[in-house]
Amino acid sequence: MSTISRRLSKHKQLLEVDATKVPHGIDELTFFSPSIPEEVKICISVLHESSQADFRIALKSVFEYLVYDKLEDNNSNAFLAEDVDNSIIEAGLYKILHLIIRKKIKMSKLSEDLHKMNMPSYAIDDIIRLFTVHRANIENTIKMKSIGFPRLLRLQWRINVVISSGTLSNVMKPTVIFKVKFNCLYVKPNLI
């Protein structure tokens, strides 16, 4: 009977999930697929120990960094770099927000996946509220900041052959003329 009771206790331990951590094995079931970054996993466990006010300060800080490239000054009520827990929250939030923008995640999928990952409900509500109000602004700003190769919009070409000129009777010199139009992506002035 002792082996059966040991097996049952082992099964109970496997079934008991820590509600303050990301459950094991859900990486591929979320928008983070194939794996949830470590920063996000650690952030979620730290969020369960922090307050909603601290979370909102971190969310505001990450939002301002993403949209305005603005880091907070030290005399505000914001986080200080020495506070490890707050730095972990900001790092995790940055990964989450950046991936939401990059993969263009729908709000319903976002809410569902963050609930699966055991993120506190106040944090999910604040993230969804932020993206509901500011999504277009965030995406446009990120798009303007991105540097990439231009895309070819239009290409016209022709071949001119000079058969003869005033001084020579038989030149037969071909000339290829290209007219190319690209879309203009934003290029930061210091990179030109």
Image: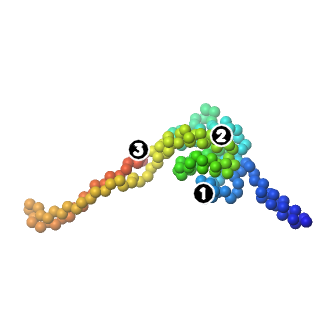
Q: Which residue is mark 1?
A: 33
| Label 3 vs label 1, nearer the camera | 1
Q: Pointer 3: what residue?
A: 189
Residue 72 shows in the view:
yes
* Left or right of 133 on screen, residue 85: right
Give the label on residue 4, or none: none
Expressed as whole percent of the image width and height from the top left, the position of residue 35 reads 62, 57
Which amino acid lies under the numbered mark 3 shown in the image of this protein? Answer: Pro
First in sequence, mark 1 or 2: give its number.
1
> Closer to the camera, 157 or 109?
109
Q: Secondary structure at mark 2?
A: helix
* Quadrant that contains the N terminus: bottom right
Which residue occupies 47% across, 43% down?
140
- Alpha carbon distance from label 3 to label 1: 35 Å
Figure check: 116 above or below 169: above
Q: Position of residue 16 (x, y in %)?
A: 78, 54
82 and 111: which one is in front?
111
Which residue is tagged 2? 55
- Toward the front, the furthest residue is 108
Q: Secondary structure at mark 3?
A: helix
In percent of the image, x 56 and y 41: which residue is there?
Answer: 132
CA separation, marks 3 and 2?
A: 35 Å
The residue positioned 12% from the left and 67% from the top of the image is: 170
Q: Is residue 104 shown left or right of residue 3? A: left
Disc tally is: 3
Spatial CA distance of label 1 from label 2 is 25 Å
